[in-house]
Image (cartoon, rainbow, N blue to C red):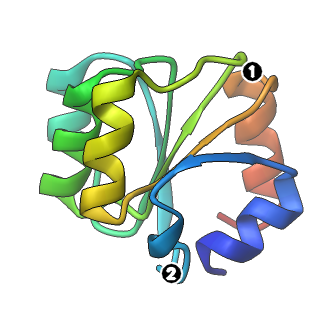
Amino acid sequence: MNIQELCKELNLTPVAGESGMDKEISGCYIGDLMSLAMAHLEEGYVWITIQSNLNVVAVSALKEAACVILADGVTLDANATVKADEEALAVFTTEDSAYTLAKKLGALGI
């Protein structure tokens, strides 16, 4: 499944990096601590978090994550939005909780 298909399936709201929507998804990481994300986020993973700053984009780009989903209605800050667009890192927001997103991703086989 690619990011564009995931966006439609989960009814996500794009907030940045729409040029990177063709990446394939290989897994998921859920967490808010940057150090743990650095250790466990893998290439092609969806990262579900409530962190919305520039560090999220930096870690995602470094680890080659497929995309970031901001749970609980969190929005990306302005600097992070600019950097995500530069990195072609798709970032979405949703009112769903991380738990709800995890259940939905599991139902999709991710």
Q: For residue 94, what is the image quadrant?
A: top right
Q: Secondary structure at mark 2?
A: loop
Residue occupying image coordinates x 74% and y 61%? 7
Residue occupying image coordinates x 23% and y 28%? 54
Q: Nearer the viewer, residue 110 or 8?
A: 8
- Give the residue number, with chain letter if any, for mark 2: 24
The label on residue 14 is none
Above-or-below relation of 88 to 12:
below
Q: CB of mark 2 within 8 Å of CB of mark 1? A: no
Q: Looking at numbered disc 1 in the image, what kind of residue is underneath it? A: Ser
Above-or-below relation of 1 to 102:
below
Q: Position of residue 80 (x, y in %)?
A: 31, 33
Instruction: Say which quadrant the C terminus sits in.
Output: bottom right
- 2 or 1: tag closer to the N-terminus: 2
Above-or-below relation of 64 to 104:
below
Left or right for 103, reference 77: right
* Distance between the alpha carbons at the discs numbered 2 and 1: 23 Å
Q: Looking at numbered disc 2 in the image, what kind of residue is underneath it? A: Glu
- Give the residue number, with chain letter if any, for mark 1: 97
Mark 2 is surrounded, within 10 Å at the Cα level, by few (under 14), some (14 to 19) or many (20 or more) other residues, namely some
Above-or-below relation of 28 to 69:
below
Instruction: Say which quadrant the N terminus sits in.
Output: bottom right
Q: Secondary structure at mark 1?
A: loop
Q: Position of residue 37 (x, y in %)?
A: 26, 34
Q: Nearer the viewer, residue 18 or 5?
A: 18
Q: Nearer the viewer, residue 71 or 16?
A: 16
Left or right for 95, reference 66: right
Q: Position of residue 83 (x, y in %)?
A: 25, 45
Residue occupying image coordinates x 25% and y 59%? 86
Q: Nearer the viewer, residue 27 or 52?
A: 52
Left or right for 92, reference 66: right
